[in-house]
Amino acid sequence: MDNGNDNRSKENKPGFKWDPLRFIAKNPDETLKKVDGRLDKLEKECFGDKKDKNSNLKNIFDVYGVTRRDFLKWTAFLTSALMLPYVFKPRVARAANILTRTPFIWLDMADCMGNTEAFIRTAHPTPAEIILNYVSVNYMESIMAPAGYQAETRRTETVKKYKGKYILVVEGAIPTGMNGKFLTIGAKGGTGLEIAKETAKNAGVIIAVGNCASYGGIPAAEPNPTSAVGLSSVTNRRVINIPACPANPVNVVGTLVEYILIGKAPQIDGLGRPLWAYSGRLHDNCYRRGHFEAGEYVRHWGDDGAKKQYCLYMMGCKGPFTWNNCTTAEYNQDISFPMRAGHGCIGCSQPAFWDRMTPFEKPNADAKIIIPGIEATVDEFGVGLLGVAGAGIAAHAIYTGVKKNKNKENRKDKEKKESKKTAPKNGSDDSK
């Protein structure tokens, strides 16, 4: 298992362009052999000598009425999202099954528990949400039965017993002010800062779920009285950030499945996000993009443009400045995302979005958005080019809007001229 400490190799450097298809194409037999060997080993550790290992996940899905067909469709989708060849589809299914037995610690820090609620309060959960509900949760304050000293003992014992093997998920920012005393947890009154550091030390893989855990989120917004920061700022271990508010379960499970398949965390961009999920802008894949190109915008809530689902850029949509896969891996049983629901993106996958992207519903030109870096191909856009990129998007929006209005005026003028030509003159007798 990857201990998360080796950041020196080329493939672990931020900005490295991970191409699984190219890697597997070069070493197909060797890659599949390694993956199969790893899955065999993990299945033996998790299920022992049981013949029907897949019955575990099947029984779980039966409870929720998820058919085999539903699961196969989801497996195909996740395989595609991870940029893996089709031959990996059954292996992704095996990894998902193993995930339900992997030791898991979920820490809640300075947060609203929005990510937890999003996963466990779904009326018709997807396979990803179901899997997150049935991982081997050794410690998760919001759903575990033990409390007080018993709960703390459960966490410390898991850290010792499964050293280097357990998955650590952290939700919420880490207050560092007053040596972390703004947040104390449990019967012993340990600070969130201490607990996060101790638990991260021996984890097999570390994931920060949501914007708060990834970059500090709302707790870190100005004036940040508790000196809240993201998880990566308090540990020297590599942290995989799954930002958004809340994070999409597909991105969480996909990251964990990749970890189980290859034994190490996925390749990440300069902001610590998995490249397979965060390498594209929402704007590029939005179904309203055609209206943007045509200069067709919603200009007031509830106007004719809103009814026709025109582009929301003029209403403050931050899709052109936000990297995530919301438009392809959707929310609410995979049927919606903010723009489809009629509201613009607020940029919650980006660092300091609360300070840099507000006000959320004003035209972007008026909002004076401050974005220190915007990635053309995740990392290649520098600060200097940001102004050009942002200005280019704004200029396009203004140009297409002006052009469209001008075309309307020209059509009206033309219609007036045509009507004058065809209109009968005063006093004429049309009956003749």
Image: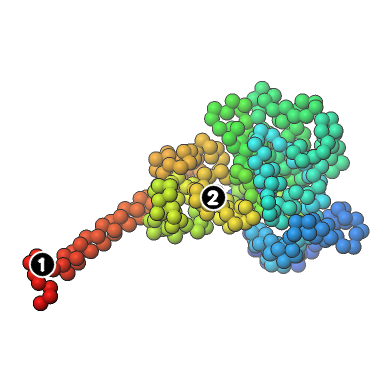
Can you give x and y, in whole percent of width and height, for residue 119 in the image?
A: 69, 47
Taking the spot 60% from the left edge, 55% from the top edge, the residue there is 330
User: Which residue is the site of mark 2?
Assistant: 338
Mark 2 residue crowding within 10 angstroms, few (<14) / some (14–19) / many (20+): some
Where is 365 relative to 288, above or below?
A: above
Residue 262 visible in the picture: no
Can you give x and y, in whole percent of width and height, for residue 397 in the image?
A: 38, 51
Q: Which amino acid, by three-letter code, is at mark 2?
A: Pro
Taking the spot 41% from the left edge, 44% from the top edge, the residue there is 363
Taking the spot 41% from the left edge, 54% from the top edge, the residue there is 305
Mark 1 residue crowding within 10 angstroms, few (<14) / some (14–19) / many (20+): few
CA gap between label 2 and label 1 equals 56 Å
Residue 50: quarter of image: bottom right
Quadrant for the C terminus in the image: bottom left
Mark before the other along the chain sequence, 2 or 1? 2
Left or right of 183, for residue 150: right
- Residue 78, label in figure: none
Residue at the extreme left: 427
